[in-house]
Image (tube, rainbow, N blue to C red):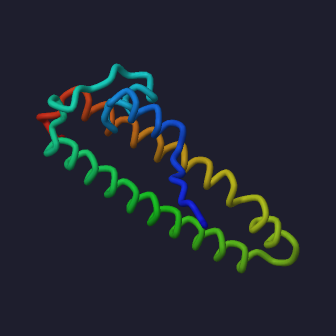
Amino acid sequence: MNQRTRVTSPQTRLAQRRGSDAMGRLSHLAGRPPVPSSAIDLAAAERALRRQRRLAVRTAAALVLSLAVLLTAAVLTPGRLGWAVLFFAPYPVLLALAAVHVRRAERIEDDHLADPEDGA
């Protein structure tokens, strides 16, 4: 006699008890005041999401290009120096790409929150 048990996150149970929606919960976690569900502009949110998708594609393309350049440099570098390029050079590149991506993604979010009707 097996009894099924529903497993949910403690955050989900807390949100269900409060009756809050996902946007209010997420904005509260981000340190911003909760947004009432009636104030959510879905068209502006879609525009912001499209902008972030384009940013993700550009970041992925930059990652592929930079790793291809590093691999080419490692092949063209003689001896152990080529291995050093493979071992040490990708990390600063990844760190720089991640920092730029996060900064631009946050700028998109801030633009969306500042003027959701604009969509720029």
The percent coordinates of residue 75 (x first, y second) are: 72, 80
Q: Nearer the viewer, residue 109 or 104?
A: 109
* Residue 22 appears left or right of 86: left
Residue for point 34% across, 19% down:
33
In front: 91, or 26? 26
**Location of residue 48 (image quadrant):** top left
Quarter of image, res 109: top left
The residue sitting at the top extreme is 33
Q: Residue at x 54, y 51 (%)?
A: 7
Position of 11 with respect to 114 (left or right) is right
Camera-nearest residue between 106 and 78: 106
* Along the line of sight, the residue nearer the viewer: 96 or 75: 96
Using residue 93 as the reference point, say whether residue 25 is left or right of it: left
Residue 21 location in percent, x, y?
31, 35
In the rendered picture of this protein, how many numbered marks are placed on residues? Answer: 0
> Is residue 96 depicted above or below 20 in this figure?
below
Residue projecting furthest to the front: 1
Residue visible at 66% across and 74% down in the picture? 71
> Residue farthest to the right?
80
